[in-house]
Image (cartoon, rainbow, N blue to C red):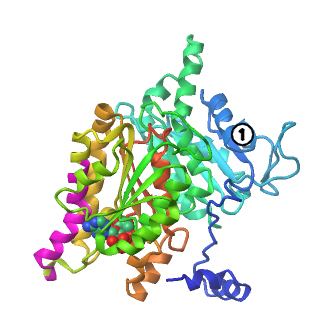
Amino acid sequence: MADRYLHFTGTAPGRFLTRRLGLPQPAPLRRWTLETPRLDGPLLHLTAGTSALTEELAKALAAIGPTVDARTTGPGGPTGVDPSVGTARPTGADRPTGTVRPAGIVLDATGIASAVGLAEVHAALHPVVRSLAPGGRIVVLGTPPSSEDHHQAAAQQALEGFVRSLAKEVGRGSTVQLLRLPAAGVASFDTSAADGPHTAAASRTAVARAGSTLRFLLSPRSAYVSGQVVELTAAAPGPAGDPDAPLTGRTALVTGAARGIGAAIASVLARDGAQVIALDVPRAGEELVRTADRLGATALPLDITAPDAAARIADAAPDGLDILVHNAGITRDRRLANMPADRWAQVIEVNLNSVLRTTDALLAAGALNRGGRIVATASIAGIAGNNGQTNYAAGKAGIIGLVRSLGPRAAAEHGITVNAVAPGFIETRMTAAVPLAIREAGRRMNSLAQGGLPVDVAEAVAWFARPDSGAVNGQVLRVCGQSLLGA
Ligand code: NAD
């Protein structure tokens, strides 16, 4: 179902009218295309206070795109920024000349360990936030709040409130996220320490862990992700591979792949080089074959709740699976008082039990290769709850429990990560069936004032699936435009 309001606000009369009436102004989101794979401008690298990561981070950002000089905040804010025009002036011979709006701003706040230090966050971003290009990205780097130092914990937790609020303010299709680097690495970032080479190595490792996530968050691929917190583990990131096809040589299985979000996931994984097996119920056979043929994928008509589903999946991937995406899902909405046991059971069976069963069986059979990636599909309903969806929300919350518990163990025992996407309102056949008023509310009640597209969820899955995302584990990423539900 097309979003006519988004289209209307893109026209001159639509813009005029909706502005006069104080209605939402969704900006068209710029998503990844072959022609526009990167953000439309340089990255501005800022540091709040001091950080031993600065040098390594500057190198990592330069590999992502053109950068504006790395700077440290001072009393007047970052140097080289003209607050009167609100634009950053890049410096250096090989940097773009003239006045340039940054398309991405990375604020390294890993060194902030007290509430007093929060002034540095304001000093760094206040002068430049207005200069961010439309559809821009802000990523704040922090560390997990410490259980042993309540001053550090207060300061680092403050960053979360800051990021979630700024994400609601930036507008024009821009997004803001918080990326937490593991405390273990940060503890050794003391530049004054005598072990200079060790510190350099530690900061190199810390930045390498963040590489795939920075690439994702500072790109058009994360267009519908905003106000989120990603926490990295101290695990080795894994090999980066071919930048244009990072999943080359990997075999991926996607459940519920005939249509909707599953078809988009299959398509994006194939785009990134994976050999895809597309699974869906036998009655979706024709649609499944069409999707699979389009992608050069293999169709596997199979009900994921079948008792032999895991064995059939293992048979379909004789060399083992590298990526397993649990996307199949159903709704059978009713308020609990009106919900018969079979509607409850069907949803729990497809959305949760089958995920647990196939994951366990494939792990036990060694059918998931080392370095593998499991990605499951939760929902913001599993975080916020939803009227008429006790069964669905229970199942999706169960997915979150599964991911958080299994992630660390699967990494330790099998070298496999386990993560989830939690989509918000995504334009698919599932949401087209939602009554009009609720559908409109679902579309607008988020910071980007529009629904997401299946490809937005697929891009997040592809980031989890990357070989160099080894430090991304046990995470639940909301792909919801910062929905107000469960915010
Ligand atoms: P969809 O109904 O368009 O597609 C779901 C696919 O799963 C269908 O092709 C269906 O045939 C398949 N499927 C259902 N039961 C199956 C089974 N037993 N075995 C194998 N395949 C089965 O739904 P969608 O909107 O693309 O949703 C995909 C996933 O995202 C679901 O898990 C859904 O709960 C979740 N999700 C969607 C939204 C949204 O806004 N669309 C929001 C949050 C979460």
Residue 357 belongs to the span the image colors magenta: yes
Q: Is residue 377 visible to us here?
A: yes
Q: Which residue is identified by label 1?
A: 75
Q: Secondary structure at mark 1?
A: loop
Image quarter for ligand 1 equals bottom left
Q: Dividing the picture into quarters, in which one does residue 281 lie?
A: bottom left
Residue 112 % position (x, y): 54, 36
Relative to 386, is 483 on the left or the right? right
Q: Which residue occupies the foreground of this view, 398 or 126? A: 398
Q: Which residue occupies the foreground of this view, 261 or 162? A: 261
- Toward the top, the furthest residue is 194
Q: Quadrant of the C terminus?
A: bottom left
Q: What amino acid is labelled 1 in the image?
A: Pro
Q: Is residue 481 above or below residue 410?
A: below
Q: Which residue occupies the foreground of this view, 297 or 370? A: 297
Q: Residues within 10 Å of mark 1 (few under 14, many from 20)?
A: few
Residue that appears at 53% across and 74% down: 450
Residue 290 belongs to the span the image colors magenta: no
Q: Is residue 467 above or below residue 424?
A: above
**Main SS type for the magenta part?**
helix
Residue 109 % position (x, y): 57, 39
Q: Is residue 480 visible to us here?
A: no
Range covered by the magenta-colored residues: 338-359
